[in-house]
Amino acid sequence: MAGNRNLHRANREKNDEFYTQLADIENELKHYTHHFKDKIIFCNCDDPEESNFFRYFALNFEHLGIQKLIATHFDAEKPTYKLEIDRELDLNLDGKIDFADIQRIPLQQNGDFRSPECIEILKSADIVVTNPPFSLFREYIAQLIEYEKQFLIIGNQNAITYKEIFQLIKNNKLWLGNGFNSGNAYFSIPDYAIHQYAKGVYDEHSGLVKFRNCHWFTNLDHSKRHTELDLWANYDPEKYPHYDNYDAIEVSKVKDIPKDWQGAMGVPITFLDKYNPEQFEILSSNDFRKNEDVPFKAHGLIKDKDGSINGKPTYVRILIRHKR
Ligand SMILES: C[S@@+](CC[C@H](N)C(=O)[O-])C[C@H]1O[C@@H](n2cnc3c(N)ncnc32)[C@H](O)[C@@H]1O
């Protein structure tokens, strides 16, 4: 059917099909193991037969003390199914809960994370862990927040600058996880998508694509978030110019944050990788406008030509201040 073909093409063109490696999941999830005990974990953007998220939790079900694991399969066009592992259901009666205890349960709907059926599962779950479609990231996060869920998900770093996401970050309702090894995230992709990636992104030997712009987003606490950033630099008016439009100084490298400047500072978004809310507070740029002519920015970042210094624009900046 032409309609179905168009739908398939639309899904493909959104570039949402890339699959997380087990090693990357293990590398991040090891920082949160204490969060999963007695919890219901939901992977709601995962083909459970293929997903390494489902595999990770199934493999570690006993070790993490999980109560229940649920993963739903999405198909744009037809009803699908979910896989579940339940601590109370030792199907093969061998005294342990593992892959042998997986139940396959049909869904009435298509596994869309927004479908009423998946929302009911979401309501019953404690923690959502997955790599959702990047094209639906705003909507995806909004749903997790609406249902007050804990989560650990992968997203594009650019999402930090979306107004909805930055407000959550600023209000300490969402933060970055530990991150991929050296910032490199590797994903497998379907064959049809190979031509969509430039040389250097797709590696034909490994069959994987490498993205440098992905990060983990979470509201689960982890120790890196409480690690103090060591600071060495002192304020020097020559090195730290003021913005034309904001009462704040420009700090172009996170490592150069001056330890003795008590006012607002504009830093690159890479700062969030080092952000410890006990050490710094994140500010809204709107509260530091020098005059009424500087436009209000719904996102609260310093962005575009309004972030100029002596008429020269800078990159996107987050305003921060020392807490003590
Ligand atoms: C970036 S891929 C990641 C897949 C898997 N979570 C992983 O990490 O390997 C996002 C997945 O979400 C699925 N997806 C797309 N739209 C969805 C929707 N509305 N509801 C649920 N899943 C969806 C896609 O089919 C795709 O496989």
Image (cartoon, grey):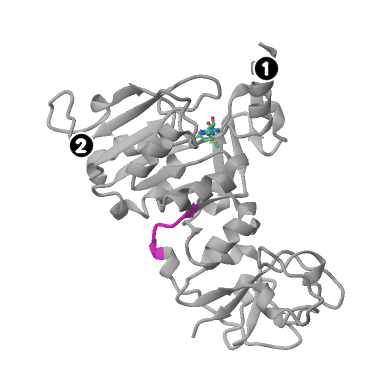
> What is the CA distance from the residue labelled 2 to the residue labelled 1?
43 Å
* Closer to us: 248 or 33: 248
Seen as rendered, the residue at the extreme top is: 1
- Whether ligand 1 has any atom under 8 Å from the Cβ at mark 1 is answered as no
Residue 122 showing in the rendered view: yes
For label 1, the residue is 3
Which residues make up the magenta segment?
217-223
Q: In the rendered image, which residue does mark 2 sit on? A: 87
Question: In the rendered view, does 107 fall on the left or right side of 169?
Answer: left
Give, as a three-letter code, the residue at label 2: Arg
Q: In the rendered structure, find residue 71 and report the number of the disc placed on it.
A: none
Front position in the image: 180 or 269 = 269
Q: Is residue 186 above or below residue 293?
A: above
Percent of width and height locating residue 230: 51, 77
Dot 1: element = helix
Image point (64%, 59%), residue name: 163
Q: Decide which of 236, 36 is in the foreground and name it.
A: 36
Residue 208, by quadrant, is top right
Of helix, strand and loop, which one carries label 2? Answer: loop
Mark closer to the chain start, 2 or 1:
1
Residue 43 can be seen, yes or no: no
The x and y percentages for residue 72 are 41, 30
Q: Which of marks 2 and 1 is in front?
A: 1
Q: Considering depth in this image, is 46 or 186 the residue closer to the camera? A: 46
Mark 2 Cα-neighbour bin, 10 Å: few <14, some 14–19, many ≥20 = many
**117 is higher (above) or lower (below) than 305:** above
| Mark 1 crowd level (few <14, some 14–19, many ≥20, 10 Å Cα) | few
Is residue 120 located in the magenta-colored stretch of the structure?
no
- Residue 3, image quadrant: top right
Q: Residue at x 62, y 48 (%)?
A: 212
Q: Quadrant of the N terminus?
A: top right
Left or right for 223, reference 261? left
